Every structure is written in structure tokens, then in C-alpha cells.
Image: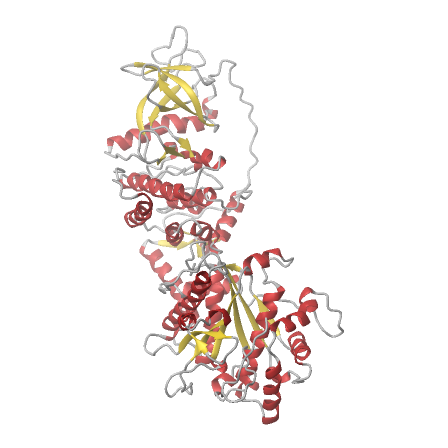
Amino acid sequence: MLIYLFSDSGGSPGRVSLGSGRKQSSASSSRSRLPGSSSHACKDFLSKFVDSEILTLTLEDWLSGRSGESGVQQPVLDVPFDLAELKKFDYALEGVAFQQLVRMPNALYASTGAVQAIAHLAIEDFLHAAVKGLWERFWGHESALPFTVQCIHSTSARFYPAEEALARDKLDGVCATAILFKGSRGSGGYSSSRGKWDQILELALLRPDIGSLSARQNDGQRPSHSVLGEALFFALRVMLSRSLSKSRTAAHNSNCMFVLLVDSQYGGVVKVEGDVRTLEFDSSNVYDCAADWIKMNAKITVSPVDRVWNKLGNANWGDVGTLQILLAIYHSIILFCGPPKYALEDLATEHSSRIQSRRSERALTDCSEVGDSTSMVNGNRLFRSQNRGCSPEIVEVQEETVDVRPPEETLKLDIGSVVAMEDADFRKEYEINDILSDSDPPIYHSNPVDEPSRGYLLYVGSSPSHLEPAWEDMNSWYQVQRQTKVLTLMKQRGLSSKHIPQIVASGRLMHPGECNKPSNGVSCGHPWCGTPILVTSPVGETVSNLIRNGLFGAEDALKCCHDCLTAISAASSVGIRHGDIRPENVIRVTSGSRNPYFVLIGWGHAILEDRDRPSMNLFYSSTFALQEGKLCAASDAESLIYLLYFACGGVSIELDSVEGALQWRESSWSKRIIQQRLGDVSAVLKAFADYVDSLCGTPYPINYDIWLRRLRRVINEDHGKEIDTSG
């Protein structure tokens, strides 16, 4: 890429630099510009240092680790920011209303110029929103924003806003987008409104396929060598330009430069540090001199390439990729404007104080204070009620193997089987026409023999005579007897929602032959005697089957989230929580309705009182449930987020222990992997995941109404207005 640049002063053409450099020591930070002779040599050097491709080729062997030169170390590209620093920065940004007015298009350099124009407008808009949000958060609203964002044109000395470059038909020549420091009155800033190269605070290179090119390299998430070489070229030019500046502010900060690398989805940060005065200004061999300085005197750190925008073009402000870019801008502002009015550490500490005040309100105590080794989750240590002792560490217990063999006449239902059910008032027969799931115990799709057009779900429990009382089949007990109790209780409390199953009938299985059950007994001795049956409505296909057959799409995810949230909200209004949300316990109903809808089934593990314990599932149980053995206010919603994450193509993992499941949750939430995946489906789902993450482990209830309204708006945008009959 050949870049022709002209001098800032006008007149005879010259070469102008873009770049930045390394943080200075306290001894060197007091200098202003280069001495006269060095200044002249630097200007002459810059006039010939104009081609990024030549520098990239010169550095190729070094970047690839093939350099064998003596005294030249191979590049060790550390990261500029670690995860702990990004997390603290994220806490300090709580409440900052970042905004992006123009969405980044999905295809960066399509055949049409309109897409390219939108991309440049989007990155300019993004940078402006970022620098404005950071300035107001850390430096305050009192002073005017001393920055502007403009495009750098490769064939002139002018800086253009993207809209002006588009109007002048100069968009094809835009080589970078810059945040410029315009200063303020009395601050020693710049009096001219026209941009100059030494005003560049930070550069963003908008290049196609940064994410995909980095993925193809052996070094994983690092930028490709071509992009990295171009970033080093721009960084060095800006650093040299600052060193020649008449502005003391720019000259004092010629030793550190951040370059942002972005495409339509991904982004990263390159930081270059070094004293440019040590560069040999040999105008006859500029690229070798520049390469030698980069190898020997510069410190280069490169962040992993991570998601910045989702597929819809929205900026994921809280994601790791975006936090890296924001933190780079934050440090660049400090170089030109000095330390912030509100320190990052103080603002991050406020996050902990807010959490602590909530804990004090709820009389919660830190388990670490009493010797508990509870791990950190979402940045917050688990807290328990003060009137309750802390549980010890999780200990693995070898489970005894018990060989319980049911009698040969154990009930087995196949398609076509007819089951006769007896209740206190009636007797009814049901024919099995399908097995809804292959779980243990199975759920059957049945039709009444006398009403074949009607369909119901049929659950069959285990006879008390099959197993010893201590080894009774608890799975079927929860699925039949306890679910019958829960659904009956819902009906008694006046709960009515089409997203919660309704009891059609419940009773005992009638077995062949005469029943000689004693008056004080539960069974006559027949292996089927006393087997409980539950029949519910409506009938549908489980989400697990939909996922397995590739039939669960983005529209289903939105509808599933809305409908399950409706069911959770309705149940919580009468003091009931589900406690076992997973793909096998959600069905999609297509018959008898104009539009398909989802129903949350499997209420056998529902929590009715404090002593009840939820079902444990390494993939779908909430963090609080795995650690405490009970639910918090947001547990069902957290389980729903996991269901949607895996249903929408989330990376399938192997979990074989509670510890592993907790580690996966902590890592996935802290790196925002879950939000990124859901953000690819819908911005509302991503926002809801953020909301649930903020409530995980706290005693605060979820505001269901606001999220149901937001989900309903998105769904109705696609299908027109619908009457909500969820109850």
C-alpha cells in the first residue's frame, strides 16, 4: 500500500508522518522537540518513508520467527491488557451510555461503494461515541470535548470527516480514521481548526477480514503479518511526527502509540513503545533503519483479535474486544490530557461498594471470612445469610453400585399400546402414538381412545412394589406424583397461562386381571398395581429434538425466550419456581394455534418452599443452584440463558463435575462468550443476558414486565400485531 503524504505547512511537497511511540522515562519526558540537526534528518527520513508494504516485507522474516540475525531477538508479542485489567475497567464504565448511531455493515468491502461508505461512517461514529463517553466518565462534563474524529486521506494533507470525504468523492483514498486532539484555550493546544499529523491521538485502520486472517495463522488470534506490518508503519510515522511537533504536548508523547485494527466484526489493539531518538535517520536506507529500530528498540504488544460488532452491526460495548479498544483510547487520552479527574480505580471500587451495600441491606456475610473456599463468580464472591453456616468444600463421594432389577413384568409402553387409567370418578383409556423424549422416564404422546382427535402428554411413574422404599425411582416420582401436586397447586392459586401445562387427568394404572388390593395397602402384588399416571395438555415437540434436527432458528429463540419468561413470571407471581429448565422440558406447540408457541413443562422439581431442592444439571442449572443447592431470584432466568446459548449454536463442552461446570460459567460470563453468541441472534437477547448476569447470585427479583415488552415488540415487528393470551 503506497501512501503519498504532503507537509502540514503547505508549499513544496514533503512527507508527513503518522505514528506514535514508547512511554518515556522521567528523564526523557521533559524534552520537547528533537535538536535542529536531528530534526532536519528526521524530516528527510519521513519524506522517503512512505510505503507500508516495503516495511512489512522487510519485517516478514522477523515476524514469522525466521530471522537469524545475531543480536536480534525474535518478537515476543505480549498483550497490552490482561483480563483482570479489562474487568476493572469494565466495572469503572458501569452506567456509561455509549451509543452508536451508524451500524457497521456485515460485508466491509462489497462491490458497492455504499457499503464501504457506511463502514467508514460507522467506525468514525464508533470512535466519536467512545471518546465522548470516556471523556465524560473520567474527565467530567464540565469542560468541552477536546477531540474530533476525522479520516486521513492518503494523497493530500487534508483531514476529512467521513461525510465530507464521501461528498468530495474521496472515500476511496481514505487510509485510516484518526482521533485528533484539538486542545482548548489556554491549554497549549492547537489554534488551527485544520487537522495536523502531530494532533493524532490514536489511529484506527479499517481493513477487511482481520478476524478471519488472524484465525488462519499459526499464532491463533493475532493479527496477520500484513496488517501488523501496516500498523507498525503508521505507528512509527505518528511517533516521528509528534517528535517534530511545535506542540509541547505532542512532542512529550512521541514515545507511545496505540493503533486500532478493525473490520466489520472483529478488532484488536497494537501498542508500540520506544524512543524514536535512537532511530538511525539514514535517508538512503529508510526501511532497513525503521525495521532495525522496531526489532531492537521498540516494545510491541498486540491484543488478541476479538469481537467488536455482532452480525447485526451493533457495537458490543461490554465485550472483551471493545473493552480493549476503549482502554487503548483511555490511555491515549491520558497522554495528551493528563490523569483523569475521576480515577479508574476509584470508579471501579464503587462497583464493589454498591454490591456491598446490597449485601448489607440483605444481611449477607462473606463466606471467606469464616474460612469458606468459595470461588469467585462474575467478579463477586458468593455470600450467604448470616444466620446460616457455610458449607464445606465440595467432596467427591464414591457412589455405591446397587443392582436393582425390576420384575420381568415391568410396564413397557410401545407405540400402539393402550393404557387404562382409573380415577375416583371415571375410567379412561389412552393409546400411545409417539414417544416424545427418550429421557428416563419417557414422556408419551397419547390420544383418548374415545376422542382420537385430541392429543395429550402422558407420564407413567413406577409402581411402589418395583423397588425397595429407600431406592424408589425418584425421577418418575418427581415427574408424576410431585408434578401432579405442583400443577394442582397452580390451579388452586388461580394461575392460568398457555405457556404452563394444564392437568387433564391423574390417577392409577389399571392392570389386567382382578385387583385384590387390601384396604390398608397400596398394591395387590401385581407389578403394575399402584402405578401413577399423569395426563397434561398441550402436546408439542421438545426443544432438544428441534435442536437435534436443526429446526431451532433465531425466530424460535426469541419466541422461546418470551414464552418461557412468561411462564417463569406467572409461576413466580404465586411463589413457585421451576428449578429444572432444560431443552427436554420445553416444547413447541404447533397445533390449535395460528402461530407456534412454547410451553415450559417438567414442573416436578419446582420450588414451593425453602426446604425444596432443585434438580442439578451441569449444563443448565444456575450458578447459585450448583453452589448452594437452592435457587436465587434469577436462577430460572439464568438457566433459560444457558438453554438459549446452546440452542443457538453455543460451543458444546464436556462437563463431568460441579467444579468444572462452575469454572465454565465463570469463564464464559467474564469473557462475555454467552452474550456474544446471543448477540448474533438478537440485540434484545444479548441485553437480557447482560441483565441476568448483573443479578446472578443476588436476592433482587427480575423485572419480567419490561423484558417481556421488549421481546414482544421484536417478535411483533416480524409478524404484525398479535393478541397476547399468555395470562
Please provide percent x and percent y for residue 63: 66, 67
| Residue 637, position as x, y percentages in the image | 37, 45
Above or below, 573 against 217 in this view is above
Residue 515, image quadrant = top left
Residue sitting at x 44%, y 28%: 475
Where is residue 167 drawn, in percent x and y?
Answer: 40, 71
Extreme residue in the bottom direction: 36
Most distant residue in the top direction:
514
Which of 599/265 is in front? 265
**Residue 312 coordinates in the image, percent (x, y):** 42, 54
Colouring convention used in this rendered image of the protein: secondary structure
Classify the position of the C terminus by image quarter: top left
* Above or below, comparing residue 365 to residue 610 in the picture: below
Q: Is residue 181 visible?
A: yes
Horizontal side, residue 454 vs residue 617: left or right: left
Of all residues shown, which one is farthest toward the left?
494
Q: Where the N terminus falls, by quadrant?
A: bottom right
Q: Nearer the viewer, residue 494 or 587?
A: 587
Q: Quadrant of residue 405?
A: top right
Using the rendered image of the protein, determine whether residue 385 is visible from the camera's viewpoint. no
Tally of numbered discs: 0
| Image vertical order of residue 316 relative to residue 125, above or below | above
